[in-house]
Each structure stands twice: as structure tokens, then as C-alpha cells.
Amino acid sequence: MSAPAPPRPDDRVSALSAITRPRWTAVLGVVAGIALLVLCANASRLSVATVVAGLPNIADFVGRMFPPDLSVLGTAVVLMGETLAMAVTGTVIGVVIAVPTALLASRTVFPERWLHYPVRTLVNVVRAIPELMLALLFVSAVGLGALAGTLAITIATAAGMARLFADVFESADRRAWDATAATGASRAQRITWVLLPENLPTLASYTLLVLDSNVRAASLLGLVGAGGIGIELTTRLRLFEYQQVLTIVLVVLVVVLALDRLGALIRRRLV
Amino acid sequence: MSATALHAADTSARLTATALSYRYPDGTQALDDVGLAVAPGEIVAVLGPSGAGKSTLMRCLAGLHSPTSGTVWHDGTDLARLRGVARRRALARCGLVFQEFELVGPATALSNVLIGRLVHQPPVVSLLHLVRRADREIAVGALLRVGLEPQLRKRADTLSGGQRQRVAIARALAQQPDVLLADEPVANLDPRTAAAVVDQVVALAREENLATVLNLHDTGLATRIADRIVGLRAGRLAFDKPVAEVDAALLAELYAGEEQ
Ligand SMILES: Nc1ncnc2c1ncn2[C@@H]1O[C@H](COP(=O)(O)OP(=O)(O)OP(=O)(O)O)[C@@H](O)[C@H]1O
Ligand SMILES: [Mg+2]
């Protein structure tokens, strides 16, 4: 067998720079993806014509909301206060649970599979339960009212944030962590001296975002009797009191927007 | 040269590597039968082309990699055999200065240097960032020695590259080590700052009588500050000579084939 002549540099360059043909599996995947999308659009009855035909109905619905009926303003404000309290309490306790859970679920902090694997699985299972379902569960456990809603928000936040924080910890810069390990510091020391200080701004920023979404969630939990402003909203809707509905919606809107601004302000100072 | 003979002959050495080989999990043989001995107060510079295994050697000497075969002796103890607290105590006796991005950015310079004292703290209280007064004084003292008094309470990520590297040096000093290892400690600094930082490392190492191994890219700087030069090439020891015996021809041979 004679050794082949070494390829000329030109040949190597042209061979290496040839465009790689897409593999047929990739082509098949794209086609299947498009087909799936079409099927989904069909199943969700997506139809431009119906939307256009429905526009006057929306206008009519909105028209009947005006002018807002301010007689429910007092009740709405009080209930919104309760909603906010539920969201804040649930977020704070949820995050307090989420941080240690996230540490245990991080493969980089606890490479031991027997530790991070079950924690990760538990977090994913809990995260898969919709908030409304959790609220129903807690209503049947502790009865109607704000406690059930607060518990639902706490658990949902704990699981959701644990997953998010675990990803933050896993993608964190390892160099200071490794350098600290080389000084002989223990893992617990490295967590409070390196990992948490490095990621605190990110964690705080996520917490503010989730507080925002928890306020919106808490506004709806009343639908299943788990406290907050949602119960008033559904009652008024059922009674066709659209002008009162508008007042309630406006109160929610003002609070959510104010919170959003406040969150943005704090985040800017954090990072 | 028999590696065991090297160890037996060099009982005055504080850091000894005998027949050191290291293979990465992917099969790369990064070190192959390397022997090295460093006495207290001695400054050894490691030179060699890129990929020669210099960083790997540093990590093995520091006990961060356990050798595939051979042993690293630190004052007669083999780090690879230690576990738990004993291992962490032994790690602390070896100060490390690597490239500059190894500090906790949002923490202050002082907090970063206190990390060098953590191994000596009661385990639970230290989690709350409470450090004994004596240890805080050691950390502050280390920062003063590298000339960072004005930066003591500044966030590490607001410092200049040279200042940051001085914080890393202070952290290593705060460990009160007897071995100092530096892997390209000044690679990201401009030549003048780099020379100043290296001079400071060397001065401190001599004051503290530390067995010191530096890995530098700048051969001129290395031959100026070191007592001995170790040449590494493709994972093997190319030479190990007092700096007076290292000439341009030897260095040219060491780096032969590497385009600059
Ligand atoms: N984590 C790793 N996994 C696999 N191989 C590695 C790893 N780190 C380094 N190597 C390989 O080991 C060899 C020695 O690498 P090392 O980093 O020690 O070289 P070096 O002398 O420090 O080079 P440089 O001067 O460029 O920093 C190289 O061939 C490198 O590709
Ligand atoms: Mg290197």
C-alpha cells in the first residue's frame, strides 16, 4: 500500500470550507415541525375571519364598561391590599425555600447524584402543577380564603424559583469558586462567601420579576375561592356589572403598573 | 534519572514532585515523568511552549489534580492521600495566584482576602461572614503589605487589573502558606505593571521564605527574578538549571517549532 501524497494546502482549505449538506434527519425535523405548527393552529381554531367578525363584540363589551362605577372602589382597594399581601408573603417565603433547594439541585454545587437528582425531580414535578390547581388543593385543606392562596403562591414560587436559581448557580463563573476551594475553604463557606455574593443581584432581580407575576396570579386565585380580588371580579362579571368590573380592573392595573415601575427602579440600582 | 533518587537526595526541599505523570480523562498525557524539588526561599520559574503542561504541573503541585502516577510531597505529606479537613488544611498551606479573574467581583478587597483565612474559622459562624479578630488583622496586614490600603473596602470588580492581582496575592499571603504557586499571574497586565507585580511577589516570597514556583510567559522577566529555570516541553522535563546556566540557545531550543 503506497502512502497517499499529502494533500496540497489548497485542497485542504477547499475541503474544510465546503458547505456541509444538511442531514436528512434535520430536514425531516423541520418539515415535521412546520406540520405540527399548522395542526396546532387548526386545533386552536385560529381564524382571522372570526377575530375580525368579533371585533364589534369587543367594542360593545368595552363600551358597556364605561363609565366605571366607583361605588366598588373601597372594596376593590381593600381586596387589592389583601391580594398584594398574599403575593408578597408567598414570594418572600417561596424564595426563602427556593435558595437552599436550588443549591441542593445544582450539579455544580452538589455533584453528588444521589443528592441533586431527587431534589431536581421533586422541583420539576411541583413546578408542573398549575397555580390554580395548587390553590384548589389548599382550599380543600385549609378552607376558603387568603391562606389557601398564599400557600399556593408560596409553593409555586418555591418550585419555580428553585429551578431558575439552580440554573443561575450552574451557569455561574467557576473561577472564584475554584480559587476559594484551593484555599481550603469548605463547600458551605464557598456558598456564602463566593456563590451567593456573586449571584445576589441576579437572584434579587428574578425575585422582583416573580413578585410581579405573583400579584397577577393572586388577582386570579379568587376564582377558586383562595382569597384576593379575584372573587369580587368573578362575582361582578356573573352579575353583568361591567361598570364595576372596570373599576376593579383599573385598581389591579394601577397596582401592577406601579409595582412594575418600582421593580425596574430597584433592579437598576442592583445591577 | 530515577525519580525516587531525586526525592531521597533532596531532603531539604519543601515541595517535591517525583515521577509525576498526569493524564486528563480524555486521554491527553499532559505530564510525563516530571521530577522537581523546590527548597524554602527558592524561586523557580517554569518555562515552555503553549500546551507543554505548565498549568497542569501547577495544579498537580497545588493538590488540585491528583497525579495519575508519581507523587507530590509537601513537607513529607502526600496531598492525594488526604481527605476532608486534613486535606483542606494542607491545601491552605499552598498559596495560589492564577490569572486575574478569580476574585469575587461584588465583594470587597478585604472580603476576598478574608477567604484566605476561612479554613481556620469555626465552620458555622463563618458562614455569616463573621471572622475572628486575629484573622481579620492578618487579612488587613496582607492587604497593607501589597499596598492596597486605600482599596481595602472597595469592590473587587472596581479595581484595576494590577490591583486585582495584588488582592489575589494578599489572599495567598493571608493563608500564611509555605509554598507559593503562580500560574501566569500577570498574563493580562501591561509589561510594566506585570514586572512590578512579579517583583512584589518575589520580594514577599523571599521575606516569607516560601518555596515558590512561577509560570511566566515572559522569558526575560523569568530569568531576571528566578533562581532556577525549569523547561517543560510536551509534558516532559527539558531541563532544570540554575538561572546562570540558562542561555538564549537553550531557550530557543525549548521553544523551537512554536510560532510567536
Ligand atoms: N481539562 C482538560 N482536559 C483535557 N486536556 C486538557 C485539559 N486542560 C489541558 N489539557 C491539555 O493538556 C496539555 C497541557 O495543558 P496546559 O494547560 O497544562 O498547558 P500550558 O503549558 O499551561 O499551556 P499555556 O502556556 O498555553 O497555558 C495540553 O495539550 C492541553 O490541551
Ligand atoms: Mg497554562
Image (tube, rainbow, N blue to C red):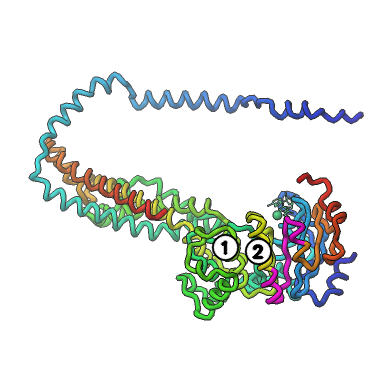
- Say whether mark 2 is within 8 Å of ligand 2: no
* Of residues B123 and B215, the one drawn nearer to the viewer in this rendering: B215
Residue B83 horizontal side relative to residue B6, left or right:
left
Chain under label 2? B
* Amino acid under disc 2: Ala
Residue A268 horizontal side relative to residue A30, left or right:
left
Is A20 rendered above or below residue A170? above
Which residue ends up furthest to the right in the rendered image? A1
Residue B220 appears in which quarter of the rendering?
A: bottom right
Which residue range is magenta in the image? B202-222
Decide if residue B117 is in sight here. yes
The N terminus of chain A lies in quadrant = top right
Decide if residue A136 is in sight here. no
Residue A29 magenta-highlighted: no
Residue A81 horizontal side relative to residue A122, left or right:
left
* Of residues A224 and A211, the one drawn nearer to the viewer in this rendering: A211
Which x, y percent locates residue A21?
Answer: 64, 24
* Of residues A116 and B170, the one drawn nearer to the viewer in this rendering: B170
First in sequence: mark 2 or mark 1?
Answer: 1
Q: CA distance from mark 2 to mark 1?
A: 11 Å
Residue B154 horizontal side relative to residue B99, left or right:
left
Chain under label 1? B
**Disc sitting over residue B163 in the figure:** 1
Which residue ends up furthest to the bottom in the rendered image? B134
For label 2, the crowd category at 10 Å Cα-Cα, with few meaning under 14, some 14 to 19 and many 20 or more, is few
* Residue with the mark numbered 2: B196
